[in-house]
Image (spheres, rainbow, N blue to C red):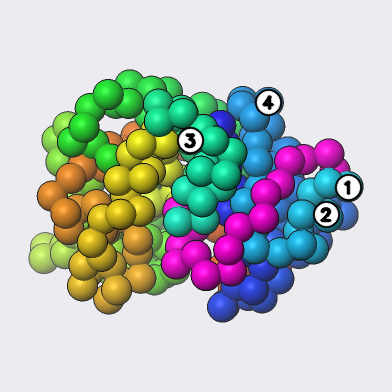
Amino acid sequence: MIIIPARLNSSRLPNKVLADIGGIPMVIKTAKAVEELDKVVIATDSKEVIDVAKSYNIDAILTSKNCKSGTDRIYEAAKKLNLNDDEIIINVQADEPFIEKSVVKALLDLTKKYAKNSDIIATTCYKIVSLEEAKNPNLVKVISSLDNMALYFSRSLIPYDRDGNLKKYKAHLGLYGFTKKKLEIFCNMQSGILEDIEKLEQLRVLDNGKKIALIEVESKSFGIDTKEDLQKALKMHIL
């Protein structure tokens, strides 16, 4: 199942999940981009989003306004939907209207591969970007081990390039894969100081000594976090 967390009042760009992208609300465009892969449900704190989803014949479920993160929101939705512990759940962010099916399919396959590995709590993906792109703190970077497990995520440039020769970086895409049981484990983990400093919830897994498996993908998609991102998205749609 694909669950899309959609909090209406985003701190940086309020109501962005309903922003018009080529005549379609952003969250709906995101849902339609992936609906051929699996059943899609929007998890939201807004009756307005529920009504919009219904008008497009997309399932949506009302969740608490007090969810700390998008992952907590999809966990609440998973419980309300009575999903089995071994159900594969893919978290696709509502602000990814250009996400490619191939990216979500790759993550789905990776999640299935590690579903029974208790050390790997989540799966996610990254793409290769230039140094200039990586300088943007809104673009989260990741470094990985030789077996493609996440070592650290940061808004800063990582790794530090002492000799100045590194021209490409791994940019994290905000999609995650879990089983329902691993989602429960994640949401009950103790939050660490790194998560609070970087404002990156995935660091909770690493802080607790567990693993996040990675896969490299090719993608032109990007998360819409700011007004500038939204203008870029609108321009992309026109082009």
Instruction: From the viewer's side, name the closer residue of 228 and 163.
Output: 228
Q: Label 2 vs label 3: CA separation?
A: 23 Å
Where disc 2 sits, the SS reads helix
Task: Give the residue at x 29% y 73%.
Answer: 196
User: Which one is in front in this view, the residue at disc 2 or the one at disc 4?
Assistant: 2
- Residue 122, given in percent of the width and then of the height, sits at 32, 40
Pointer 1 with pointer 2, Cβ within 8 A: yes
Residue 117 lies in what quarter of the image? top left
Label 3 environment density (alpha carbons within 10 Å; few <14, some 14–19, many ≥20): many
Task: Give the residue at x 38% y 43%.
Answer: 183
Residue 13 lies in what quarter of the image? bottom right
- Residue 54, given in percent of the width and then of the height, sits at 83, 46
Q: Name the residue under label 2.
A: 52
Q: Mark 4 points at which residue?
A: 36
Q: Name the residue under label 1.
A: 55
Q: Which amino acid does label 3 sit on?
A: Ile
